[in-house]
Image (cartoon, rainbow, N blue to C red):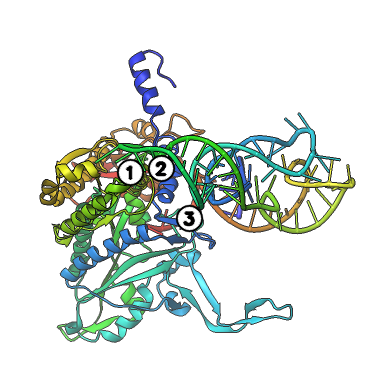
Amino acid sequence: MRQFNCSASRMAKSAEISTKTAITPRRNEDFPEWYQQVIRAAELAEPSDVRGCMVIRPWGYGIWENMQRQLDAMFRATGHRNAYFPLFIPLSYFAKEAEHVEGFAKECAVVTHSRLEADADGKLGPASALTEPLVVRPTSETIIGASYAKWVQSYRDLPILINQWANVVRWEMRPRLFLRTTEFLWQEGHTVHETELEARAEARLILDVYERFVRDHLAVPVLTGAKSESERFPGAVQTLTLEAMAQDRKAIQAGTSHFLGQNFSRASGIQFQNREGQQEFGWTTSWGMTTRLVGTIVMTHGDDDGLVLPPRIAPTQIVILPITPKEETRAAVMESCDKLAKELRETRYVDLAIEVEVDRRDLGGGIKNWEWIKKGVPLRIEIGPRDLASGNVMVSRRDQPVKSKELISTRELRSRASEILASIQQNLFERAKEFRDEHTRVINSKTEFYDFFTPKNAAKPEIHGGFALAHWNGLGEVEAQIKNDLKVTIRVIPLDDSSEPGSCIFTGEPSRRRVIWAKSY
RNA sequence: CGGGGCGUAGCUUAGCUUGGUAGAGCGCGUGGUUUGGGACCACGAGGUCGGAGGUUCAAAUCCUCUCGCCCCGACCA
């Protein structure tokens, strides 16, 4: 709309605009709306009648199940085991850690009654008040701590390395599908250690596990490090975090790992006799990843035609689309599709059998094709009558433009399927990393900083900003001021020594290192 | 909880200012024509216009209340 000086680029622009995309609006037109449309078009989830809650549909849940299975294997490999603790936490347990209460009180759902009874008008209502209200877990430190207090007597009982897969409830004011829902699914690890050093190492280890998982499985590049005091988990001594960048350049927290010091063991009475024979409080950690990761995938990899799934977590990695223009050839095409599917399922990608689906539905080929594009299936394979004779198939990669397809021999496909999936996985990661790096800026002055984070159009802010690496004096007041002015916060303080010391761009005071600033989800 | 916007068929919406009893596109069903691509033709199903109350001979339209959704803010994975 503002291209008036170059006819070539204007034409390119209008051609681009006239090209129909599967999702309306496009990302650059209205990102939040695009996000919701992708979730709907890909049939990941839908809002439920319960405010803030969502129905996770099979395609979305399949992604979560893959994440679960893969993360779980990594936890097991690092010595953790799964268990399950109650959904309900007695109010008195919850109240034990002061900061914790302060942090979560406002978001707690509380069960106060146990029974429904009809009143005179036949209307059902709660009848029997509980002697002690129960908090629906927003997180389980306190209820798990109660068990740990019983289990831990001696240093010989340590470490305790337990994870649970569960749902939690946080009464949110502004829900958004996957990113922030009232009820969500997650895993929460809770460990107890003999020494501070060991517990800190555990929190670090999990951060590494998370980073590896997000990078290698979800193809999402992240920055890792610590949270500033104001962003820390309520009750934690240190919160480690992973921050990804969505395509609207806002930061999204992909997971957290907390070193809790002795705060929670004091509150819950997790005490052991140490090697010197003295009573000592245990050193604990907790860490979690949530269904928000599904939203992170959408915002990291999605395009104007819908979802784009990294092969490693796609519920179906390859879909085979039979092209059956003539009734006479239909059976032969179908048979050939089934045969190829069977062969592909016998090949492995990473260490698992490739997930293949033949779309046999009696629908127009174009419709089916677009459905799978919107769902983000990594590889689409078309087989028609002509291919039967030639022994070829048409292959389309979801990370390539929708129209592009490649004719390759069935034999080549069989031998290269795994390699192609790996190449898509790799490409998605690189593309995301490139995007992030492109929108990461080293910033050296306050003016530049404010400029970076101020949209040109205040009424309808365009996509702007990104990650800013800037020096900071370490004080909360400065952080609070920036947050107030620009809605920008410190997302992460890197732990590595990649930054030189300098001076705070807001106050001129000495700064140990640059920290990462961004707007966030 | 504050500020803004919006609720009409499964989806997107017209109609609302100037009340006269709901229309379209997509999707859906049936039949047919098609078929390396979100195809075409015909017929058809589907709406107590978010809900309640009020004004009126008459309300999707005007008034009051209420519920829900979206965006921004406070809060957060």
- Element on which disc 2 rests: helix
Mark identifier at residue A156 = none
Q: Of the two numbered discs 3 and 1 on the same chain, state the one appearing first in sequence.
A: 3
In this rendering, the answer to whether A456 lies above or below A96 is: above
Mark identifier at residue A175 = 3
Residue linked to disc 2: A482
Residue situated in front as seen by the camera: A76 or A334: A334
Looking at the image, residue A391 sits to the left or right of residue A477; the answer is left
Amino acid found under the numbered disc labelled 2: Ile
In this rendering, the answer to whether A82 lies above or below A419 is: below
In this rendering, the answer to whether A36 lies above or below A207 is: above
Residue situated in front as seen by the camera: A81 or A439: A81
Question: Which marked residue is nearer to the observer: mark 2 or mark 1?
Answer: 1
Q: Of the two numbered discs 2 and 3 on the same chain, state the one appearing first in sequence.
A: 3
Q: Write the residue at 47% across / 30% down.
A: A457
Residue A222, x across and y down, in percent: 25, 49
Label 2 in the same subunit as label 1: yes
- Element on which disc 1 rests: strand
Residue situated in front as seen by the camera: A299 or A78: A299
Give the spatial CA distance, label 3 vs label 1.
24 Å
Chain of residue at mark 1: A
**Residue A127: which quarter of the image?**
bottom right
Q: Write the residue at 28% across / 34% down.
A: A444
Residue linked to disc 1: A517
